[in-house]
Image (cartoon, rainbow, N blue to C red):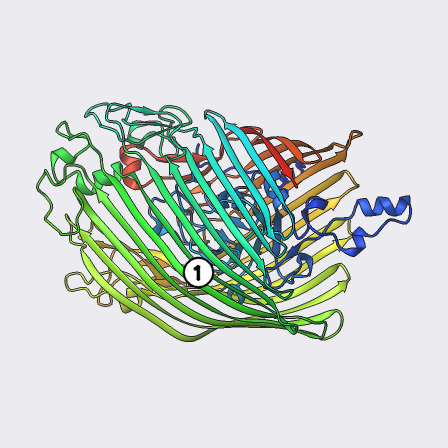
Amino acid sequence: MIFKHSHVALAVSLALLSLSSQKAVAQTASPSDASVDNASSSAPINKNEAKKEATKLEQVIVTSSKRAQPAYKVPYNVSVLTEEALRENNITDIKKLIAESEAINAPANSARFADNTTVRGLNTGNANGNNIEQFVRSTLSYYLDDSPLPNIGYRIKDIARVETLIGPQGTLYGAGALGGTVRYITNQPKFGVLEGALNTSVYQTKNGGVSNDIDGVFNVPLAANLALRASLSRLDEKGFTDRVVSRPWQPTPKWVGTPNASQTLYEDDDWQRVDGARVALRWKLTKDLELGVSHTTQKQMAHGTTGTQILPLAQDPKATDAFMTSVVINDHTIISPNEEFANRTFVMNTLDLDWDLGFARLHSSTSKYQDQRQGQGDYTGAGQTFYGFWDPSLDINDPAFNGKPAWIAFDNNYEGLVHETRLSSTGNGPWSWVGGLYYTKTQRGLRFSEIVPGLDAAGITGKDAGRRTDEGYRENLSSDYTETAFFGEANYQLTNKWTLTAGARVFSYGDDGYSNIRDYTGPTSRESLATEKQNGKAYYKLNTSYQLNDDLLGYATYSQGYRRGGANGYRDYKTNVVHPEIRAYLPDSTNNTELGLKGYLMDRALYVQAAIYQIDWKNPQVGFTQTIDDFFPINGIANGPDARSRGLELAARYRLNENWQVTYNGATTSAEFTQSKKISLYANGASGDDIDLTAGTALWGAPKWKHNLGVRYSTVLGNGMALSASLRGRYVDKIQWSDNSNRLYPAYAVYNGNVGVSKDNWDLSLWANNLTDTRAVVSNNTGTGQRQELGARIVYVTPLTMGVNFSYFFK
């Protein structure tokens, strides 16, 4: 019953006051999170006024529009999590951040996986675990301060706030912002302040060991106009999933596991260790000019796979579906003869300049980064499919098997230089504007190998200068991409309440793609070089906003986003010629039309942010495979038919009085193809690989409904100690995880809570996630070969986890 449809009444989910996230939707969770505006910080006149002031919500300043302004004044959907809210909710990485978002979704896989991310229903990739990053497609872009990154494995440490911009952001944020953008804004050095902090968290997940997450930060004034800020962090997270080497139902032929040949059980194998550091120096050269330099680094070893192994269909006579068989051993054990891990190293150096020119503020940022990822995964099932028939010594079911199943290795590298210089206007006239220059040069290399122990000894493969021992297949995909862009937005205030905005981004790019495939047992070897260039491509934005009163804003916006294209490695086969339209895939783009309302009501006791939208997706990039000799696959991407996403988002926070707050965040979305299209592999004949995508077919990867609702209590005790407690949770509707409409993750709800106390320069909190120990399917890591030989790996929501956090601050 793993993928059985689950009906959960919407009314029930809305009634549960524990379904919440501590998300600061354009305001903070507590007064310490941000500066309070003049209205809410003025001295009360009498007791009644004091009570009113106590129920007002505070505002937070964001820079998502490339200028600093209150979030409730930004005329599109932007939400903010402040540093305090991030810590209170134990949000320390992108996976946890996405889990708390009502508009963004990704499968909840273990740390070593990169995930397909869905924003507002925009997705055509499977919502499951994937060992190969070539298959990962995201409609979300990631920024660390002003630098776009291909991945955001960087942990949320010494981060002032996280800004989430929902909807296409092509004019200000460029390629990749197809559905939205996530920005990590780091804390900057402070002049004239000696301060620091130490934070530690000790926690344990059911069936796992005791984990520790510790970080510290130190801010030092080196001179009146010079300051240094340094932060260090270390995560030692114990796993809770065991790994066994062999199949209990078929102990012979014996399999030899790795890394230790004599070991058959690896307990708590899905662990990770992460070390991070950031050093930033800020120099105020004059009262108008500041220079900053920073160095950021992180090393991560993400080990093992979270999941539960279930029996192959052939081993469970009562089952009729390979995803609904019985558990092999228990709910926290998988089968894998091979060690699985991802070893990642991230380094970024940044130079920033801020200059107040009087008529405008100039900001210039230059970053150079490198993100390296090496690792390996088990390939036993697929290895049997592609290599087992060649020789008895390679057949995992043959008595002559050599005992060493296949595995895969990957070596991925991303590096780039990114520069942006922008001017943002100052002054109080009817015109305001921001404009700038953007340049990037990035290199991407994705290497993937299939290693079949004993392949060379079987005498099947030939020799190659670059071939690894027992390597049966290798992909080397690289890209050298250069882009130059000019961007800008102009605002004109028609009246003191009505503002019009127009924006554009004009860019030129070149992409040299190289593909080198070596198949040592099959006919798919090929080498290709493709260049894609485009000059003067433009995307636009139009917006109108109306200030209904001082605290409430209504807006309508039209915005565009885009994602770069690339080249495929499909090859002509016999007399068939690959269709010209799929030798390369075009950039895809989105056109977003949105109406929204945001701001404060009820004398600032209630904050609301609501948006209704329609996104038209042009040339969506979909996975497409060529099969050679009816057996050997060549994977790539094609442009599918146009699609459309429609939805509604609502976020609200209500402060009942000075002690109680209620929060709600929710979204519903529906996405489908709006056209029909046949994607043909060959120009001169039909192929079994051709696919027909039909108008009305639903896209996959997102729930129809997602809700967060909850309650928070805070007070100051007689001894001056502050006390807070919250009960939160999340409801996620069923999710179709592939293009097969019958493959569904069922709906579920999880509940989290914490209790904290603080006084002077310390705070202490006790917390628990998944209070009811809900066991809900959220992902799977399963190919056809694995289902047949080992059984499917099913991923459930993380079991009950309990911990204690302690922080100490000093000045």
Furthest toward the right, the residue is 46
Residue 265 to residue 140: above or below: above
Which residue shows up at 78% across the image and 29% down it? 719
Does the image show residue 742?
A: no
419 to the left or right of 614: left
User: 692 or 207: nearer the eye?
Assistant: 207
User: 577 or 226: nearer the eye?
Assistant: 226
Does the image show residue 196?
A: yes
Location of residue 404 in the rendering, given as x and y in whole percent from the top left corner: 20, 32
* Total numbered labels: 1
Location of residue 548 in the rendering, given as x and y in whole percent from the top left corner: 76, 64
Image quarter of residue 678: bottom left
Secondary element under disc 1, as helix, strand or loop, is loop
Assign the C terminus to one quadrant of the image: top right
Location of residue 200 in the rendering, given as x and y in whole percent from the top left corner: 55, 33
Image quarter of residue 639: bottom left
Instruction: Determine which residue is flagged by label 1.
Output: 695
